Amino acid sequence: MENQRVAVVTGAARGIGAATATRLARDGFAVAVLDLDEAACEAVADAIRAEGGTALGLGVDVTDAEQVESGVARVADELGPPVVLVNNAGIIRDNLIFKMTEGDWDAVMAVHLKGAFLMTRACQAHMTAQKYGRIVNLSSSSAQGNRGQANYSAAKAGLQGFTKTLAIELGRFGVTANAVAPGFIQTDMTAATAERIGVPFEEFLAHAASQVPVQRVGQPEDIAATIAFLVSQEAGFVSGQVIYVAGGPLD
Ligand code: NAP
């Protein structure tokens, strides 16, 4: 276990985060599974351990600086210093701008932007000390604008600027930073959108698939596979990039 590289994935109790934690464990990382609900994290960690991997489930609210600091310290103590961070935790609070509340705005900014900042600040200390690191931030095709998502698209576009700055600042320490921007992925998040607009999820999925050049919606594993490449050792010359994973071209 001492030789295993340690990866931290936030929002990893379900969806893209759980698929990414599982994939990275299969690729040989010891994985810290972070999410709001520690029991839900443990279920993912148990599944990883059941297939022979190493995992630690931790309840951490990424918007809380103290929880982030103590959570990352626990990861370093129990698994080893993290050299991979995937900032995946996310929420949506969709509304047209005239109905969007200050609370909707602040909540989305807090999880996506402040959460990524706090987690990165805590983990980069370990990465720079080891002169090696890989950071991946979850952006979105919504960064280009999406009706009902002024808060979310601003946060996801903000994460692209954050990523490029991390790449510039941390490159000299052997740390790369990239963003993955998924298109439509079949998770609880997109199921919640279907419910909000009152369309059965199956119908919502079929319509979304018809809009995608490869004629299907994405699965969490599609995103996990892209992240797996970006956090690999061989991806060391890819930094500051935004990779759209959307079944077709986006800028
Ligand atoms: P998901 O199924 O809703 O999972 C997100 C996870 O993040 C949940 O387990 C959630 O916990 C957790 N989380 C929320 N707030 C948190 C906090 N403050 N601290 C720690 N964890 C927190 O979402 P997903 O579809 O897998 O999306 C994962 C990421 O990809 C997000 O950043 C999302 O914006 C991005 N993305 C998704 C899509 C898509 O089509 N699904 C497209 C583009 C980008 P709770 O369950 O307890 O709330």
Image (cartoon, rainbow, N blue to C red):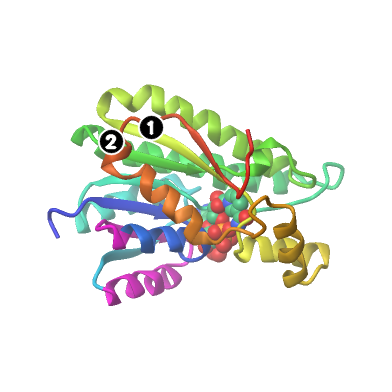
> Mark 2 packing: few (<14 Cα in 10 Å), some, or many (20+)?
some
Residue 91 appears in the rendering: no
Q: Earlier in the sequence, mark 2 or mark 1?
A: 2
Q: Is residue 181 above or below residue 202?
A: above
Residue 144 in the image: x percent, y percent?
A: 69, 36
Residue that label 1 marks: 238
**Disc sitting over residue 222 in the figure:** none
Ligand 1 is found in which quarter of the picture?
bottom right
Please name the residue shown 66% across and 53% down the image.
92
The residue that disc 2 covers is 125
Residue at (37, 64) in percent of width and height: 22
138 shown above or below 46: above
User: Looking at the picture, which amino acid does disc 2 mark?
Assistant: Ala
Q: Would residue 67 appear left or right of 194 to someone viewing this image?
A: left
Q: Is residue 223 above or below residue 232?
A: below
What segment carries the magenta color?
A: 25-51
Measured as percent of width and height from the top left, residue 75 is found at 27, 54
- Is 54 drawn above or below residue 127 in the view shown? below
Residue 47 is covered by the magenta coloring: yes
Q: Is residue 97 left or right of residue 106?
A: right
Please tell me which residue lies in front, 178 or 106.
178
What element does badge 1 sit on? loop
Q: Position of residue 2 (x, y in %)?
A: 12, 55
For the residues labelled 2 and 1, the Cα–Cα distance comes to 21 Å
The residue furthest front is 214
